[in-house]
Each structure stands twice: as structure tokens, then as C-alpha cells.
Amino acid sequence: MKPLRISFIGCVDFSHSALSRVSELQRTEVVGVVTRKSSKFNSDFCSLESLAKKNGVPCISVAGNKQRELATWLQDQHPDAIYCFGWSYLLGPEILNIAPLGVIGYHPAFLPQNRGRHPIVWALALGLSKTASTFLFMDETADGGDILSQVEVSISNEDDAGTLYKKLTETALEQIGNFTEALCANTYKRIPQDPSRANSWRKRGLADGQIDWRMSAKSIYNLVRALTRPYVGAHCLYHGRAVKIWQARMISALSGEVENLEPGKILRTGTSTIVIKCGEGVLELLEHEFSELPQEGSYL
């Protein structure tokens, strides 16, 4: 039986893990890799050039959104399927129609819910208790194509962007082996999405990462864990400059003692930690980029 010929597109850490997994499969042949040399907007950017070179696979690094040029290159690879995991542009019909099995995409959310941008960040910032690892047949819409594989992933109160990214990756790598086998055997299923159940998350802006101490401790905690590494970090303003906050925890024991105090007041400082009254509740900053700790009794 001929191996399944796969062209691969991606440029983030997850893309690298997924390409490594696909390259290990017995009934597949990676015939081409598309990646980037750099990215201004992917904080988890990872070029796939070195991995493609290590595996002896033709590779092209593209800049911008030159789809016609990319389509010509992909057509020359004669793929049976294209895997596109971790790419920042919607693909047009000139690419979507190249491979007989189509283009398989990835979205870490419970489609048809939560289409759109920054699904890991928004899931944590909103305090969701679950998400999903979803592979789909890409079309010209954003995350609207038929579902190929979907597995629920729980989100604990202790999860942050790094741990949830890892959970999703581990789940996705197992899915890749399963659905690739189904594609090889022609036993896969296409599950249409119900658009009446869909919503789309918007692109996150700089203001979405700014802490307002009038927010509840829980909301600030969720924001900090949503934007921590591998992402850009939440921030607060202090003496006119942005200060990154990477890790925090809620302190419920103090909440009843400080209900008459204003938001943003420093309750105490440790060697490197800061305890702050929020609009509701108390938060301790465990990892941050304050060059000098604010004094107890002062305000952020």
C-alpha cells in the first residue's frame, strides 16, 4: 500500500511537535514543509526548517501571505493531504483544493463554540473549566469546516497557558496518529458543525492584557495565567510604565479583613512577593518584573 503523502504547514511550537509525530508514523510520507524564518506576532514561534532538513524533507520559508506562490510549490509535492497546524492566515481555494483529502487544520477549542483568535488565552481568561483539541477540514471560513477529530480537555484552576498548551499538545499528538490511520484506511468521518451554536473570539489587543486593580482577584488571576509563558504576559501600569506579571495566586483568608480598603493598595511585601487588595478579594504576585517593590500601604 502506498504511503499517505502529506505536505505540512506551520510555524509554532505545536507545529514542531506535530511534524515530529507525523514523521514517525509508519504509513505516511512527509513530502514538503512550509514554515517561516521569523514572526512578529507568534510568541510561541518555531521555525520548522531544521526539523525538515534533519528528516531530508523539502522545505520552503515564506514571508507574508503569498498564497499563489505557495500553491505552486505545494502542487509540485503532489500531496494526498495537507496538514496546517499553527498558521496565521486563512487559506484560499488555490491551496484548499490541491490535495484530494483536503487541508486538515487545528483549533484548540470546543468547535463550533469559540472559533477565532487566541483560543487558549480566552479560555483561561474567561475561567472556562474545559476546552477541546479539535482537528477539522479547513474551508474558506475561520474554523468553520467539518470536524475530523475532537477530544475534550479539562482546565483546572491551577492550569496556566503553559500547562494547558502542554495538555492540548499531548492530546493532539495522540489524535494525529489515530486520524491519520483513518485517512490512510479511508475510514474517517466528517462531522459538520452546527453554525447556530457557534461564536467567534476576537483578536486580543494590548489593552486586554492590562490589569485594572478594580477587577476581582479571580479575574486578575485568570488574566495572569492566561497570558503567562509562552505568551506575552499580563501587565499593570506603575509610575507610567508597563510591568509584566507572570504568576499570581488568590489569598481568600485575607478577604474578610480588608473589605474596607481600596483596590490597588499594597497590603504587604515579601522578599519578592507583593500582596494587593483588588476590587473584590486579595491577590499575591509571585513572579513579576518590578525592579523595586512598592512600599506597603502605597497603591498601584
Image (cartoon, rainbow, N blue to C red):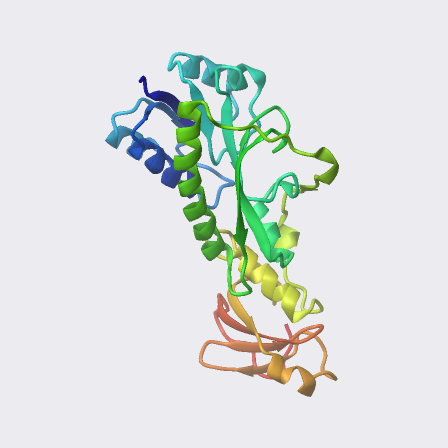
> What residue is at 32 percent from the left and 17 percent from the top?
2
The answer to which image quadrant residue 110 occupies is top right
Mark count: 0
- Write the residue at 49% across / 67% down: 288
The answer to which image quadrant residue 259 occupies is: bottom right
**x, y (%) of residue 115?**
63, 39
Decide if residue 14 is on the left or right side of residue 113: left
Residue depicted at 54% across the width and 77% down the height: 274
Describe residue 230's horizontal placement relative to residue 128 as left or right.
left
Query: Which is more toward the observer, 200 or 288?
Result: 200
Vertical comparison of 34 with 212: above or below: above
Q: Quadrant of the N terminus?
A: top left
288 vs 73, nearest the viewer: 73
The reply, left or right, for residue 220 in relation to residue 273 is right
Q: Can residue 26 be seen in this snapshot?
A: yes
Q: Nearer the viewer, residue 238 or 251?
A: 251
Judge whether 197 appears above or below 97 on screen: below
Rendered location of residue 252, percent (x, y): 61, 79
Q: Look at the image and tell me whether residue 45 can be seen.
A: no
Question: On screen, 57 above or below 174?
Answer: above
Percent x, y for residue 298? 63, 80
As drawn, the residue found furthest toward the bottom would be 257
Q: What residue is shown at x 63% (from left), y 72% (from top)?
A: 300
